[in-house]
Amino acid sequence: MPIAREFVDHQVHKRLPPHTGWLHVFGSLSLLAFVSQVLTGILLLVYYRPTTDEAHKSIQYITGEVHFGWLYRQVHAWGATLMIVAVTLHMARTFFMGAYKKPRELTWVVGVLILLVTIVFGFTGYLLPWNQLSYWATTVGTEIAGAVPGIGPELRTFMLGSENVGGETLSRFFTVHVIILPWALAFLVGLHLFFMRTQNLATLDPVGEERKYPPEAGIPFWPVHVAKESCVALVMLGVLITLSVTSPWEIGEPANPLETPEAVKPEWYFLPTYQLLKYFTGSLGKILGIAVSMVPFLLLLLWPFVDRSPARHPRRRPVATTLGVIGIVLALFFGVLGHLSETHRTFLGRTYEFDVYGVPRRAEPRPTPRSNEHAEPGHSRAQPEDEGQADLPDES
Amino acid sequence: MTEAHDESRTTRRSFVDVVIGIGTAITSFAMVLPALAYLWPVTQSGLGKAREEVGDAATWTLWQARKVVVAGKPVLVVKTDKGYTAMSAVCTHLGCLVELDPVKRDVICPCHAARFDLQGEVTGGPPPRPLPLYQVSEVQGKVYVST
């Protein structure tokens, strides 16, 4: 088909702006991460059972019995983290280079929606192994929905399919994770790519003054830029496999609605919001907390319409650049605080106990480190003292 | 570049292209193969040992025999005075399922009057081979049979 061939040819040999370089690889990296999640997700779907009776056992089965099951499960779990990292890096690059400005505002808005969908992917997927951390992290994560003014309790019940996290929640989250969100993301990504390809990448020239560069000065997408993207893609795959082998996610203990483990926390990408919400107490406080946590996302979504200055180069837009850096620092700050809160740690020979707000106090060193203390939510590096924990009655 | 060189000469570019091509092919292969292995069903014979729980020790009386399915095959499990014994329940003659003879305390096949002892050895009748034995163990009050 000559039209198709022409189209593909044109796209493949498109010239990108002369400044296009290694910082412009994160978009394709995000796409690769998504493709990886879809493929490994499909494989996991073959053996996963989405009921409260069988979910945990099916994970055991996949990890222990299915050929290479362990590999695909780990790649999928770590892939979620990598996808969020890639999307965030891509977003940061776009932000600092002002690429969201006219005429690319819609591309950015779609991008923020992609970020949101990615996060919801992570949240819904987290419940599916149906282990203790899945169950309680979901309980904690959905609890805040109940505080939304007016519709709170109904909203929460709708999300959970019941008064509490249970079989109905598993069904709903499974449906959302496996069919609704993949289509939503495919559509959004398609739109995002369509816009991006139609308008080509932004230069660093101010809005309205984008200089046309001669074709010889542009970077050919194939093979030059694709070569850079492939390098980074291979490195990412290497990191993914390395993490899967050296730092595997636990199967964990089956969900027990009658027993809450200590210091349950959501996954790392929720920690900043999670920690921030802790400072807003009381019924009025909670509403304020919800509003405050929504501010960053609303700001992100509407940013191209808030920032109307024409400059794109980060050095010529000190206000936006500073705000961006502040945003990142704040996110890191609250994230680290969230990570340290409710833990017992030793720094430079002194032991500290961090309370729920992240405030440290001197404490006595605990005689035997309990494996809960340093556990990353849902993800424990297998260490000698941890081995007793994963003992399940039916394992042969 | 110029077209001055003749087609049979290997340029650096074409060499690198071939190397990248081979590398891509190997990588793709390496990624597809485990996925195919993953999709291949887990079979007991492929992995060796299968173990299934077949009952509560407390509910099993002495010299009681039960027929159970282990790894898709029928197995005769008998509680004897010397412990449990388990053997394939498929008669090696023509495939009928065997029973325990409670009087003689050995194993008989109703089809052609074959007889086996409690170790599966043929003691009478037409069967050409003994009944294969299974391993039985009792763990925490439950009885397990394994291949």
Image (cartoon, rainbow, N blue to C red):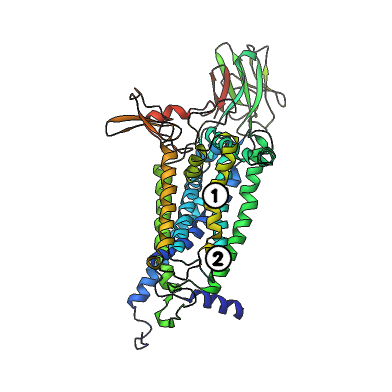
**Residue B44 visible, this orientation:** no
Circle 2 residue: A107
Residue at (54, 53) in percent of width and height:
A297
Q: Is residue A260 above or below residue A337?
A: above
Point out the residue furthest to the left here. A349
Q: Which mark is residue A119?
A: 1
Chain identity of mark 2: A
Question: Amino acid type of disc 1?
Answer: Ile
Residue A162 image position (x, y, % from top left): 69, 35
Secondary element under disc 1, as helix, strand or loop, is: helix
Residue A371 image position (x, y, % from top left): 41, 29
Residue at (55, 66) in percent of width and height:
A105
Tell if the residue under mark 2 belongs to the same chain as the one under mark 1: yes
Q: CA distance from mark 2 to mark 1?
A: 19 Å
Q: Is tag 2's residue or tag 1's residue first in the polypeptide sequence? A: 2
Q: Which mark is residue B33?
A: none
Residue A85 image position (x, y, % from top left): 45, 53
